[in-house]
Amino acid sequence: SAVISQKPSRDICQRGTSLTIQCQVDSQVTMMFWYRQQPGQSLTLIATANQGSEATYESGFVIDKFPISRPNLTFSTLTVSNMSPEDSSIYLCSGGQTNTEAFFGQGTRLTVV
Amino acid sequence: QQQVKQSPQSLIVQKGGISIINCAYENTAFDYFPWYQQFPGKGPALLIAIRPDVSEKKEGRFTISFNKSAKQFSLHIMDSQPGDSATYFCAASKSFQAGTALIFGKGTTLSVSS
């Protein structure tokens, strides 16, 4: 399977600020996704990153809070906007081809203070 | 609404023992049931997966048992080793294809004592 790299791997941010997380895949993939893993909780899908069009968001997640870009088949970004301590989580990028299983990056550990 | 319930939350097993993690699901439309293994600081990695047309799948020391009528599935780790110490997540989706959202359980932290 392809390798996904996320940047940054971790960050500590002030409340009210925004952080952009980058996801780079070492080969072209059809599908890319963003998940959130809150402390002690399961992984929750935030949105599907669509190339060349607006991301598809899951219930409870909105574009104003989590804007996503996907300019090509190997790269995507997730921005966590106007952060509060409740946004402290691990954010994971996932990808795969249409007819294959999805794989994950190593995650970005975000702490909001 | 939690669609996939996982237990136990944590598990301690002696080296060489059997680790058993259980999951239950609610949505009968689910058609794919993977298990992911996650080490600290790493993303989840697919460990083993099963479709509901079989009741058991074995890969090395890892076995999935699936009970469609009870809507339950479990992961058995035989001859558990310290290197197996990690967090394990069960998941479910309507398809194995990457375009289908995965619904995850809350995870089980496994510690294998040497």
Image (cartoon, helix red, strand yellow):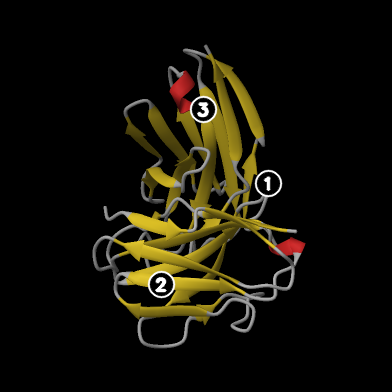
Callout 2: chain: A
How far across and down, in percent of the image, does residue B53 sit? 36, 50
Give the residue type that dot 2 points to: Ser
Q: Residues within 10 Å of mark 2 (few under 14, many from 20)?
A: many
Q: Residue at x 39, y 69 (%)?
A: A32
**Residues tagged 1 and 2 counted as in contact (Cβ below 8 A):** no
According to the picture, the residue beneath numbered tag 2 turns out to be A76
B35 or A33, nearer to the observer: A33
User: Which mark is first along the chain, 2 or 1?
Assistant: 1
Give the residue type that dot 3 points to: Ser
**Residues tagged 3 and 1 counted as in contact (Cβ below 8 A):** no
Residue A27 position by quadrant: bottom left
Q: Which label belongs to residue B85?
A: 3
Q: Is residue A99 left or right of residue B113?
A: left
Callout 3: chain: B
Q: Residue at x 36, y 44 (%)?
A: B54
What whole-number distance in Å separates the C-alpha atoms at marks 2 and 3? 32 Å
The answer as to whether the residues below labels 2 and 3 share one chain is: no
